[in-house]
Image: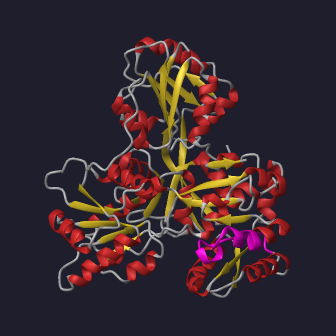
Amino acid sequence: MTGGRIFARAVAAPSWAVLVVFLASCATTGSGTDAPAPAPASIVDPPARSGAPTILIAMPSSPTFLEVRKSLVSEVQRSFTVHTFVVGPETTEADLAAAIKTAAPACLVLMNNATMNLYRQYQVANRTAAMPPAILLMASFVEEAQARLRRATGIVYEVPGVTAFVNLRSVKVPGVTAFVNLRSVIRAPISRVGVLYRPAFRKFVARETALAAKEHVELVSMPVPNDVTAPELRDALHDLAQKSKVDAIWMLNDNALVRSPAFVDDAWRAELSEAKLPLIVGVPNLVEPSSPLATLAVVPDHEALGLQAANLLFDLSENDWQVERHPLELPLSVRTFVDLKLVRANFGLRPEALKYIDHALE
Amino acid sequence: MSDPPPKSSVVEKTLQQHLPDLSVTVFGRLRDFEERLAAGPPDAVLSIGPVLRQHGETVSLQGYRSGKNVEPYVLASVNQPLEGSLAGKTIGVVELLGREGTQAFVNDLLQTPNVKIKRVAKIEDLLSLLEFAAADGILLPGSMLRGLMERTRLAIKTKELPGALVGLPAVAVLNPAAREIIVKSFQGLDAPTKQLLGIDSWRVP
């Protein structure tokens, strides 16, 4: 190459709202653009900002949490002093209490259920003390965690089904563009989605049913026992496919429904290989072209989650930390994993579908 | 334009294929772009007008579409257009210029000083804001609207915003020694690649 190096930020027609292109001519030297990329992020807090309120981020140190923290810190570091407290299996309530005392935060950001449990212990041990507001991130059943804490809000971690359905539409609809346009006018490609749930998920499914209806998707829900067996689960899937005539199946992130590889084979894979319905899941490792099962996995976008958390933090600070006025938020941004081989074989791939897919597997 | 916005990786791969004399890095997020800028300036930057202006860069090659170097932004909402005062309304917008910069950008386009913005990472995330009733409306390029509406069954209504015009992609050459090769390379892009960038021609200002 003999030209230059270019950075582009694709920001408006492709989604130039978010892109920038860096461009550099290969023949030029000394521009500094050959500098190595920044080293992978480690937990180093930015310098304290004099007079700025402090936020204390309590979190595990594993990569996905670091990704959220990196995005969050980059957004807030000009407005807040940031202290990070790493929570591990050995961390005690006293450790967390010491970190809170030292940082004296205006707001806490708590990541994962173990951290929230420690903070719950801290609140119990300090019943009469004033508590700073807390933002809860990256934990299962955030609603339940919030209910056990004073002055907490946050972002739900499970991806709402309605988001998954819309993404499935992006990859499932067959035919040329003209047909897609026609179908989008006269008939929604995904109009009925089946879901099996255990009793503990009843409220969750009810909420998802209402959300799905906004996108004109009927969520056909079917309860199964807590101790559902593989044959029972397969029968229920069969009923959804054959009697309820659903267009797709949505697998909840419930370990009891995917308790072992053998269970998945005997129930999910056995029925879906016959029914040939697209399966939407919440974990990417079930999208595997060499062992086909799920068509689409939709998972939270961790970097975008950091931006959403920063927005929530700014909202709270601008509203005098009135956390009670901020209900839990749903995650706005997702990443998609799609088994292209499965889609092509069974459902047809929209010509522009690849533009919607983050990870196309085949 | 009815296509959905391509992923930044698609833009990078396509541009690199068609700009063999250049080394191309595409950033989908402002933070990554600014981190890379801090490590050392490139020979040129390609982005839309507001981003180039924010970084004090001068346009060397301006993109045009249908004879215009700007495109209108529209305000979209569910069931009915957002009429009347927008003061106090929550408006979703793709993160573009950082918190303060994006707030000023939205204030300027809406000609309202006190809207509350919700920044999202990607165009498609704007749809989530409407589905979850987390925003009263969303602000986006008119060219993105059709692609978004094809993804949803929400009853999207729009409001035209007189004067809400935003500069189309342009190239700012930062290294004068590389100007000729960079300008020539971009002027040689084929029609599909220019379409990918949301333009159909280039002009030197």
Q: Position of residue B2 (x, y in %)?
A: 68, 46
Count numbered badges in the picture: 0
The image's colouring method is secondary structure
Q: Is residue B94 above or below residue B22?
A: below
Identify which residue, B47 or B156, lies in the foreground. B47
Q: Residue at x 58, y 30 (%)?
A: B64
Q: Residue at x 57, y 33 (%)?
A: B12
| Residue B205 appears in view | no
| Residue B189 appears in view | yes
Q: Position of residue A278 (x, y in %)?
A: 76, 64
Left or right for A181, reference A158:
right
Q: Residue at x 44, y 75 (%)?
A: A142
Q: Write down the quadrant of residue A29 in the picture.
A: top left
Check if residue A253 falls in the magenta segment: yes
Identify which residue, A16 or B32, lies in the foreground. B32
Identify which residue, A252 or A185, lies in the foreground. A252
Q: Write down the quadrant of residue A315 in the picture.
A: bottom left
Check if residue B84 falls in the magenta segment: no
Left or right for B23, reference B155:
left
Q: Write down the quadrant of residue B197 in the picture.
A: top right
Q: Is residue A209 above or below residue A137?
A: below
Query: What is the span of residues highlighted in magenta in the rendered image?
Result: A246-268
Q: Position of residue A3 (x, y in %)?
A: 52, 15
Q: Position of residue B22 (x, y in %)?
A: 54, 20
> Quarter holding the N terminus of chain A?
top right
Q: Is residue A158 above or below residue A80?
A: below
Left or right for B25, reference B7:
left
